């Protein structure tokens, strides 16, 4: 977490030089830390792409899973997105 905070601070300090940033974690897209970092970086004018699992995946040792079906089989974090939603996509309220 300290590393992520340090990187975010460094990037925010260089607001005049907008960057394209790929932001990821293994805690899921709904985790407080990644969402707060995402919104702060966007607020600072950066072009941010968040790539995170639909649910918490800590401890899976870098496992990379591609969905076998085009839709989710179970609900995501906080039951959003719901089972049956597309496996790949973006948030409806953040058309990025």
Image: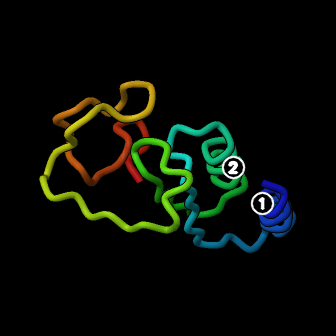
Q: Nearer the viewer, residue 4 or 75?
A: 75
Q: Is residue 31 above or below residue 38?
A: above
Write the residue at 15% across / 58% down.
68
Residue drawn at (85%, 62%) of the image: 6
Residue 92 spot, x, y in % from top left: 34, 37
Q: Residue furthest left?
A: 69
How far across and how far down the image is residue 29, in percent? 50, 45
Q: Callout 1: few (<14), some (14-19), or many (20+) C-alpha neighbours within 10 Å?
A: some
In the foreground, 66 or 29: 66
Q: Which residue is mark 1?
A: 8
Please say if the residues under marks 1 and 2 sit with CB atoms less than 8 Å apart. Answer: yes
Residue matched to label 2 = 37
Is 8 placed above or below 37 here?
Answer: below
Which label's residue is closer to the chain start, 1 or 2? Answer: 1
Can residue 15 be seen at all in this image of the molecule?
Answer: no
- Label 2, secondary structure: give it: helix
User: Residue 9 at x, y = what percent?
Assistant: 85, 60
Quarter holding the N terminus is bottom right
Query: How many labels sit on residues?
Result: 2
Q: Is residue 18 visible?
A: yes
Between 84 and 37, the residue placed more toward the observer is 84
The answer to which of 30 and 56 lies nearer the viewer is 56
Q: Is residue 39 left or right of residue 12?
A: left
| Mark number, residue 42 | none
**Left or right of residue 32, residue 14 in this image:** right
Residue 13 at what x, y percent from top left?
A: 87, 64
Measured along the vertical axis of the image, is residue 31 above or below residue 62?
A: above
The C terminus appears in which quarter of the rendering?
Answer: bottom left
Describe the element under mark 1 as helix, strand or loop.
helix
């Amino acid at each position: 977490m300290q590393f992520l905070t340090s990187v975010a601070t460094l990037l925010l300090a260089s607001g005049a030089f907008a960057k394209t940033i790929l932001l990821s974690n293994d805690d899921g897209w709904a985790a407080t830390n990644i969402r707060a970092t995402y919104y702060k970086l966007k607020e600072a004018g950066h072009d941010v792409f968040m790539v995170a699992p639909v649910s918490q995946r800590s401890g899976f040792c870098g496992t990379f899973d591609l969905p076998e079906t085009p839709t989710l089989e179970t609900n995501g974090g906080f039951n959003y997105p719901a089972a049956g939603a597309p496996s790949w996509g973006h948030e409806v309220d953040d058309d990025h």
